[in-house]
Image (cartoon, rainbow, N blue to C red):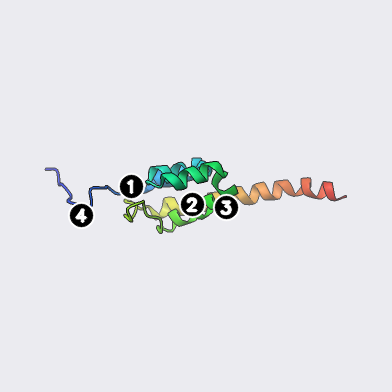
């Protein structure tokens, strides 16, 4: 038998997995903000390319630490700690790799 959950608000919580994947893949364009109801912030993030990447990274960490709420203050449902840490550690590894690979380009211009 299906169980119907009653909510105090007509707005349903957004899914954690969808939100974190949208942030990780298309976060620089603010797509996760549109998904969670923050249309104006999503547009601002789209125009600034995720606050030049800084805003995107802050949102990603916030979602991974389960501190991100939708427009109506509802927490994301189905939080998965293992997926959050996997995506966060993968992002750190990718950013460090790109940083180390770009070091020779920086030092070649200095000489």
The span from disc 2 to disc 3 (Cα, nearest Å) is 10 Å
* Frontmost residue, 15 versus 88: 15
Front of the two marks 2 and 3: 3
- Tag 4 residue: 8
Q: The N terminus appears in which quarter of the rendering?
A: top left
Residue 31, given in percent of the width and then of the height, sits at: 45, 41
The span from disc 2 to disc 1 (Cα, nearest Å) is 15 Å
The span from disc 4 to disc 3 (Cα, nearest Å) is 35 Å
Indicate the secondary structure of the residue bearing disc 4.
loop
Front of the two marks 4 and 2: 4
In which image quadrant can residue 22 be found?
top left
- Tag 3 residue: 54
Indicate the secondary structure of the residue bearing disc 2.
helix
Label 1: few (<14), some (14–19) or many (≥20) C-alpha neighbours in 10 Å: some
Residue 7, given in percent of the width and then of the height, sits at: 20, 52
Mark 4 touches mark 3? (CB < 8 Å) = no
Indicate the secondary structure of the residue bearing disc 3.
helix
Label 4: few (<14), some (14–19) or many (≥20) C-alpha neighbours in 10 Å: few
Mark 2 touches mark 1? (CB < 8 Å) = no
Mark found first going from the N terminus, 4 or 2 = 4
Front of the two marks 4 and 1: 4
- Tag 2 residue: 60
Mark found first going from the N terminus, 2 or 1 = 1
Residue 35 located left or right of residue 27 = left
* Frontmost residue, 43 versus 69: 43
The span from disc 1 to disc 3 (Cα, nearest Å) is 23 Å
Mark 1 touches mark 3? (CB < 8 Å) = no
Label 2: few (<14), some (14–19) or many (≥20) C-alpha neighbours in 10 Å: many
Mark found first going from the N terminus, 4 or 1 = 4
- Tag 1 residue: 14
Mark found first going from the N terminus, 1 or 3 = 1
Please tell me how many numbered marks the rendered image carries: 4
């Amino acid at each position: 038998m299906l169980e119907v959950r009653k909510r105090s608000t007509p707005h349903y919580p957004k899914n954690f997995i969808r939100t974190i994947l949208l942030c990780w893949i298309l976060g620089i364009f603010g797509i996760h903000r549109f998904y969670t109801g923050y249309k104006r912030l999503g547009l601002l993030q789209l125009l600034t390319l995720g606050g030049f990447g800084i805003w995107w990274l802050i949102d990603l960490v916030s979602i991974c630490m389960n501190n991100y709420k939708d427009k109506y203050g509802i927490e994301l449902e189905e939080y998965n700690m293992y997926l959050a840490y996997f995506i966060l550690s993968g992002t750190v590894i990718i950013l460090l790799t790109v940083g180390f690979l770009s070091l020779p380009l920086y030092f070649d211009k200095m000489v």
